[in-house]
Image (cartoon, rainbow, N blue to C red):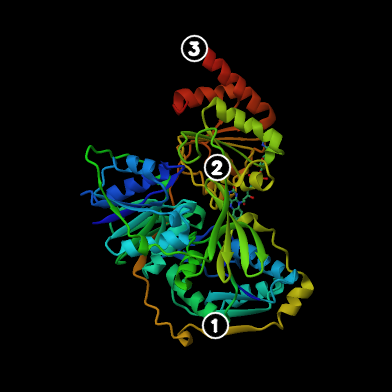
């Protein structure tokens, strides 16, 4: 089984979701017939790290035309390389979802999205209906394009002493597009653990009422070295930016501990967090649907509970030190 | 300038999907269908382009059985000018849908093709990207802002890391995210008027696409299992205690 994994990185650093895709690749190819595909511009630093990953070959496209990793350019390249593989894999991040379906279509292949389990190299499980149903798909597609749900595959770093060989794509294979121009990006400053990789996530909903109050969630998260999450209602109301939304249409997380505060438990939100190992719910309404998926529930006013929690955690920390 | 919007009827998300026996799929008989919420946002954006004088015609298109007419009528009541149903009883993969939509794009020649970023039933998030690839058009996916200028659009995309702005030359494909707009409701007079608007049914066979069956099959559908402790705690102290001693996550 030959597997091609597409590298996903930000500011020259590989993302945890990429290492999850690598885990899936390893499951599909125990013989380690895994190659990596890296597209970008001036990726020398990145390449030094990637070379140490235990794969056979790195297919590198280092060109100005790939600087912003536009789908129109990158999917086209992937489709040209894909014909040599049984599987092409990315994580179901916004990056993967933007690029891989386009590449699959260019190869006249279907794509199985959001895989959470690999039963065998032809059989995959994926959630549908906001995670309310699981679907098992058996495929005989010539090239199997998969996006995998990162939270369902523990990220692994497979290191090696031997550097993988690097194959550079010829410049004339890279298409130049006049019909698409990158204008700008506004990346959120990472000041705490990221939602995708944090052990603990503290999420807040509409009940926080304002951006100022939402700081309570952030303060509690900082006490726990946790990531911050939010519901769509909280994002729509402007308490926090879009990349913190957890749910069917936001990020899917499965941390060791998820603390949901002032969140009612709409299925679209549950879709993004119900695989968490332990779920804590804080809500003033004892009948809020989210209590149905709680391991520990505390009924009460969050404006009293959060400060009390922070206070108690501080006390615990003091007794420890 | 013509704008095409794809519309998918989906199970009302307030209803729990019912499984057929022995994992044979989801029972959609008698299930209440709504227009996929993302498609509704796509349609709303198209209608706003028309109302601001930038687009001249909004056409909606759906692929499926005759039941989809009801959803298309709803789209007409929201303000679309005409509707097309590509009628088929076949199961269609995302790739098949993209191929069918491509055929409709080549027939209708829109400057802009709008899709929802995902359908809330299969959650695939791929038709728009596939269609853009097949057409070799630029794509703006997961957009939360769109600005139409002469012959081009500026779109802001919602990414896992933040936002990205791109300029696409028309014709282009866009897939819309939740925060692009808030869709309107259909007014009673518009619901009445929609009955007179053209809704054309075209059989899939008549498109002559020679679509192969998908190279996969769904072999099982099941409900996920989850067991939660559901323990009520009475104080912050008790909560922390439990998280430390019992759950061992602090
Ligand atoms: C197509 C579509 C996609 C969607 N995708 C997502 C998604 O990805 N993620 C997502 O989150 N949502 C999504 N939604 C929205 C979802 O349906 C809900 O509207 C949303 O999750 C509700 O957010 P909330 O729980 O913060 O707000 P509410 O439902 O308003 O809940 C607020 C809760 O706070 C409690 N509360 C109020 N005051 C206090 C207090 N002082 N102390 C303690 N508790 C208090 C209330 O009892 C209530 O339970 C989507 C919706 C649609 C239609």
Mark nearest the camera among 1 and 2 is: 1
Residue assigned mark 2: A292
Chain bearing mark 3:
A
Q: Which mark is residue B192?
A: none
Give the residue displayed 69% in from the left and 37% down from the top.
A211
Chain ID of residue with mark 2: A
Residue A42 shows up from this direction: yes
Which circle, 3 or 2, is nearer the viewer?
3
Q: Report the residue marked by disc 1.
A: B107
Residue B176 locus on image (x, y percent)? 59, 60
Find disc 3 in the rendering and name its residue.
Answer: A321
Disc 1, SS: helix
Q: Is residue B47 left or right of residue A224?
A: right
In the rendered image, is residue A154 in sight?
no
Quarter residue A75 falls in = bottom left
Q: Dot 3 surroundings within 10 Å: few (below 14), some, or many (20 or more)? A: few
């Amino acid at each position: 089984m030959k597997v091609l994994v597409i590298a996903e990185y930000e500011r020259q650093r590989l993302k945890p979701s990429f290492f999850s895709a690598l885990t899936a690749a390893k499951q599909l190819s125990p013989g380690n017939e895994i190659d990596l595909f890296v597209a970008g511009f001036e990726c020398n630093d990145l390449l030094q790290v990637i070379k140490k990953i235990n794969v056979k070959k790195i297919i590198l496209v280092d060109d100005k035309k790939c600087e912003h990793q536009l789908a129109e350019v990158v999917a086209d390249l992937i489709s040209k390389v894909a014909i040599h593989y049984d599987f092409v894999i990315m994580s179901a991040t916004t990056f993967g979802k933007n690029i891989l379906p386009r590449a699959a279509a260019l190869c006249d292949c279907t794509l199985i999205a959001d895989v959470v389990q690999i039963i065998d190299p032809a059989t995959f499980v994926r959630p549908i209906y906001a995670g309310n149903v699981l679907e098992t798909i058996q495929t005989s597609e010539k090239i199997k394009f998969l996006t995998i749900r990162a939270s369902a595959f523990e990220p692994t770093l497979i290191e090696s002493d031997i550097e993988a060989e690097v194959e550079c794509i010829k410049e004339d294979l890279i298409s130049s597009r006049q019909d698409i121009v990158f204008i700008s990006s506004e990346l959120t400053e990472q000041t705490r653990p990221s939602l995708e990789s944090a052990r603990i996530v503290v999420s807040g909903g509409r009940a926080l009422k304002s951006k100022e109050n939402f700081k309570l969630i952030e303060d509690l998260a900082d006490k726990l070295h946790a990531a911050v999450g939010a519901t769509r209602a909280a994002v729509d109301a402007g308490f926090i930016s879009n990349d913190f939304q957890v749910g069917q249409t936001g990020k899917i997380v499965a941390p060791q501990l998820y603390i949901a505060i002032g969140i009612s438990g709409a299925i679209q939100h549950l879709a993004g967090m119900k695989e968490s190992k332990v779920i804590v719910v804080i809500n003033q309404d004892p009948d809020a649907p989210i209590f149905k998926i709680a391991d520990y529930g505390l009924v009460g006013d969050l404006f009293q509970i959060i400060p009390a929690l922070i206070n108690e955690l501080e006390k615990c920390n003091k007794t420890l030190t | 300038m013509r704008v095409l919007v794809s519309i998918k009827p989906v199970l009302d998300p307030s209803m729990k999907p019912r499984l057929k026996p022995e994992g044979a799929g989801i029972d959609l008989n008698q299930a209440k269908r709504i227009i996929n919420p993302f498609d509704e946002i796509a349609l709303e954006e198209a209608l706003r382009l028309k109302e601001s004088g930038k687009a001249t015609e909004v056409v909606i298109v759906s692929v499926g059985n005759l039941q989809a007419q009801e959803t298309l009528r709803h789209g007409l009541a929201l303000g679309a000018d005409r509707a097309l149903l590509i009628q088929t009883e076949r199961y269609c993969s995302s790739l098949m849908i993209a191929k069918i939509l491509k055929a409709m794009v080549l027939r209708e020649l829109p400057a802009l093709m709008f899709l929802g970023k995902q359908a809330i039933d299969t959650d695939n998030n791929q038709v728009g990207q596939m269609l853009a690839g097949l057409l070799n058009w630029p794509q703006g996916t997961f957009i939360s802002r769109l600005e139409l200028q002469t012959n081009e659009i500026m779109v802001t995309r919602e990414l896992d890391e933040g936002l990205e702005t791109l300029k696409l030359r028309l014709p282009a494909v866009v897939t819309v995210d939740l925060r692009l707009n808030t869709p309107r409701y259909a007014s009673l007079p518009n619901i009445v008027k929609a009955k007179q608007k053209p809704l054309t049914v075209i059989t899939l066979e008549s498109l002559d696409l020679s679509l192969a069956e998908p190279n996969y099959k769904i072999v099982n559908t099941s409900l996920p299992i989850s067991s939660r402790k559901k323990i009520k705690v009475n104080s912050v102290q008790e909560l922390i205690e439990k998280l430390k001693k019992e759950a061992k996550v602090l």
